[in-house]
Amino acid sequence: MNKYVTSIKDNSKEYELVVIMPAYNEAEQITENLLKAAQVISSFQEDFIIIAVNDGSKDQTEEKIIDACAKNSHIQYVSYSENKGKGGAIKEGVKHANGRFIAFLDSDLELPPIMLKDFLQALNNSKAHVAIGSKLHKDSKLHYPLVRKIMSLGYYLMLKLLFKLKIKDTQTGIKLFRQEVIKPICENLMTTGFAFDIEILATASKKGYKIIEMPITLNFSRDRREKSRMTIKTIIKVFKDTLRIKKHLKNI
């Protein structure tokens, strides 16, 4: 039986900013990271909440998230026992989000949440609908393994060939959307694995929304763990999912 619980009881209030932070087996650091993210975001935005999504973790992630919620009222959560993948976790978070702006932020905080301040300013000061972090932006500062850089470049070339997107990096784990853009896209999200980002951004682009790329600071800190996740099988699945997305977008 799939257990599903949430601390979000009343979703009638619209916040200025809702930050979705998916987590899978992050018990070791999730409490500290959620509290740190809340502290940083409160330095530039008062009207916000963080929605932590426990994506069927096998460790104590759910309990640690609940602990963070008890310590900071800006933190709320969604938790379920079936692992749905990062895209599935994002979809669940967006379903519960009611914010003028909705952000995605990786829960390991390798991408500092203070960057959302510049993302918000960029959307408020422009006619853009989406702001995304880009490892390939000329002003980005990366502490990143060479093999990951090569993978990012290879994926960029594949996406440019298949979708003719003007953006260079779809996969960086910090993004900001206007609510009216991301809500309907996530309701119809087909892909829940690593390729979900490209489905969201390719769909937004096809619908005519303006996407801007922002420079990031990235401190890659879980090399061994990420290598185990990005197996040959995973890379093949990403490629297959990307082709499915290409076919799916023809019908939109």
Image: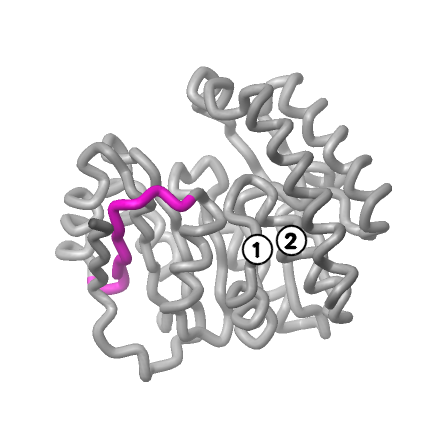
Seen in the picture, residue 29 relative to 123 is either above or below; the reply is above
Q: How is the image coloured?
A: one colour
Inter-mark Cα distance, 2 to 1: 8 Å
Stretch of the chain drawn in magenta: 73-84
- The residue indicated by pointer 2 is 199
Quadrant including the C terminus: bottom right
- The residue indicated by pointer 1 is 190
Element class at badge 1: loop
* Residue 120 shows up from this direction: no
Element class at badge 2: helix
Along the viewing direction, whichever of 243 and 136 lies nearer the viewer: 243
Seen in the picture, residue 209 relative to 194 is either above or below; the reply is below
Where is residue 140 drawn, in percent x and y?
A: 67, 38
Where is residue 65 drawn, in percent x and y?
A: 22, 48
Quarter residue 58 falls in: top left
Q: Residue at x 63, y 68 (%)?
A: 123
Seen in the picture, residue 139 relative to 220 is either above or below; the reply is below
Along the viewing direction, whichever of 150 and 70 lies nearer the viewer: 150
Where is residue 40 drawn, in percent x and y?
A: 37, 53
**Circle 2/circle 1 CB separation < 8 Å:** yes
* Residue 194 shows up from this direction: yes
The amino acid type, in three-letter code, at marker 2 is Glu
The amino acid type, in three-letter code, at marker 1 is Met
Q: Is residue 82 magenta?
A: yes
Along the viewing direction, whichever of 110 and 169 lies nearer the viewer: 169
> Which mark sits nearer the N-terminus, 2 or 1?
1
Q: Residue at x 53, y 63 (%)?
A: 186
Where is residue 251 drawn, in percent x and y?
A: 75, 65
Mark 1 nearby-residue class (10 Å; few <14, some 14–19, many ≥20): some
